[in-house]
Amino acid sequence: MKNSESLKEFKKLNSEQITEKIDQLRKDLFDLRFKQATRQLNETHKFKIIKKQVAQLLTLSKNQSASQTTPD
């Protein structure tokens, strides 16, 4: 993924940063949908990239919360 954050960079984030990044990406996705509805969007491939990033961040968030609640 050129010009976007990779999974390695996402793993360096803490839970608050992950939540903020998810919120930002969801806003970006909303903006893309709005542009598509008004026929202003030329780069439709960004939908796939952003949705994939959101899924990766949600998975990391879930894994982090599961590892914190697991008793050692």
Image (cartoon, rainbow, N blue to C red):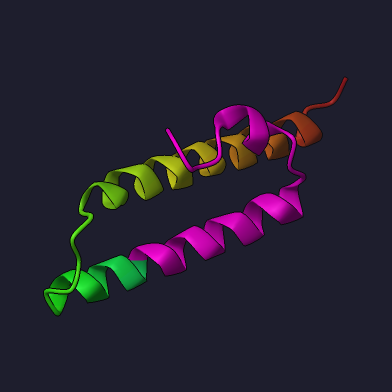
Query: Which residue lies most toward the top here?
Result: 72
Decide if residue 53 is on the left or right side of residue 40: right
* Range covered by the magenta-colored residues: 1-29
At a point 31% along the width and 50% down the height, the residue shown is 46
At a point 80% along the width and 35% down the height, the residue shown is 68
Decide if residue 71 is on the left or right side of residue 47: right
Residue 56: horizontal and vertical position, in percent?
A: 50, 37
Q: Is residue 16 above or below residue 66?
A: below
> What type of secondary structure mainly makes up the magenta span?
helix
Relative to the observer, which residue lies in front, 52 or 58? 52
Query: Which residue lies most toward the bottom here?
Result: 38
Decide if residue 71 is on the left or right side of residue 49: right
Image quarter (top left, top right, bottom left or bottom right) of the N terminus: top left
Is 57 included in the stretch rendered in magenta? no
Query: Which residue lies most toward the right here?
Result: 72
Relative to the observer, which residue lies in front, 56 or 49? 49
Decide if residue 12 is on the left or right side of residue 39: right
Residue 55: horizontal and vertical position, in percent?
A: 44, 41
Relative to the observer, which residue lies in front, 65 or 1? 1
Residue 34: horizontal and vertical position, in percent?
A: 25, 76
Q: Is residue 35 above or below residue 29?
A: below
Residue 72: horizontal and vertical position, in percent?
A: 88, 19
At a point 53% along the width and 36% down the height, the residue shown is 59
